[in-house]
Image (tube, grey):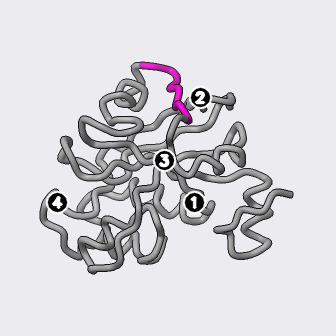
């Protein structure tokens, strides 16, 4: 069994070895590893799959722990598109040494947006994300810093998500926007 240093207990490690859910960050601007405009046709169902190049995506070591069938949540920060946050899901359908192939895209009808662009403040979505992930969850570092003034974290493209957290985000995304 390969140990992942960020997993705190044996039960978490065992779940990772059997399959995992993953956070994938998509850039909401003109630059970045994968941009929202690159993945949009896949998320809208216009393309059946999307090849995600591993390239310089960080942290690279996590890709070796991914398995076919693992579920993925896509996140984009605020930028060009006004709807940002969790935008949808997919499934890992194939793994290659230089890329991952996603299939079965599902774009949320409304993005799970933490707060209006350029107006960070505590919202029901922020409270829900804090409950699900905590304030120190690395991929949410910029959001939590903007709202709560927490320490800035380096941008993260890929991160494991527990099965329960994945399901909680799915429930939250399916709720009507005024009930989030």
Label 1, label 4: how far apart the Cα atoms are:
24 Å
Residue for badge 1:
161
Q: Residue at x 61, y 52 (%)?
A: 21
Q: Which residue is mark 2?
A: 101
Residue 24 is tagged as 3
Front residue (pair 50, 32): 32
Horizontal arrangement in the rendering, residue 163 relative to residue 81 (left or right) = right
Numbered circle sitting on residue 150: none
Separation of disc 3 and disc 4 at Cα? 21 Å
Q: Earlier in the sequence, mark 3 or mark 4?
A: 3
Number of residues whose C-alpha sits closer than 10 Å to that of mark 4, classed few (under 14), some (14–19) or many (20 or more): few
**Where is residue 39 drawn, in percent x and y?**
39, 30
Callout 3: helix, strand or loop?
strand
* Quarter holding residue 69: top right
Counting residues from the N terminus, which is met first, the one under dot 2 or under dot 4? 2
Q: Which residues are magenta?
A: 47-54
Q: CA distance from mark 2 to mark 4?
A: 32 Å
Q: Nearer the viewer, residue 75 or 127?
A: 75
Q: Is residue 58 above or below residue 146?
A: above
Q: Secondary structure at mark 2?
A: strand
Q: Is 10 in front, or is 57?
A: 57
Asked whether 50 falls inside the magenta stretch, the response is: yes
Residue at (39, 65) in percent of width and height: 140
Q: Residue at x 51, y 21 (%)?
A: 48
Q: Main secondary structure of the magenta part?
A: strand
Residue under circle 4? 116
Q: Residues within 10 Å of mark 3 (few under 14, many from 20)?
A: many
Closer to the camera in the image, 172 or 92: 92
**How far apart are the alpha carbons under marks 2 and 1?**
19 Å
């Amino acid at each position: 069994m390969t140990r992942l240093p960020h997993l705190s207990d044996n039960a978490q490690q065992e779940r990772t070895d059997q399959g995992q859910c993953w956070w994938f960050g998509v850039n909401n601007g003109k630059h970045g590893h994968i941009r929202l405009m690159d993945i949009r046709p896949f998320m809208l169902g216009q393309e059946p799959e999307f090849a995600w190049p591993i390239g310089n995506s960080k942290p690279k070591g996590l890709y070796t722990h991914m398995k076919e069938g693992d579920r993925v949540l896509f996140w984009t920060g605020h930028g060009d598109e006004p709807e940002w946050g969790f935008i949808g899901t997919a499934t890992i359908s194939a793994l290659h040494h230089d890329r991952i192939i996603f299939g079965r895209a599902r774009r949320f009808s409304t993005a799970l947006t933490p707060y209006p662009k350029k107006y960070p403040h505590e919202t029901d979505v922020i409270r829900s994300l804090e409950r699900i992930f905590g304030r120190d969850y690395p991929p949410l570092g910029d959001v939590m810093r903007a709202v709560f003034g927490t320490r800035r974290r380096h941008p993260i493209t890929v991160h494991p998500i527990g099965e329960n957290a994945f399901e909680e985000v799915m429930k939250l995304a399916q709720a009507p926007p005024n009930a989030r």
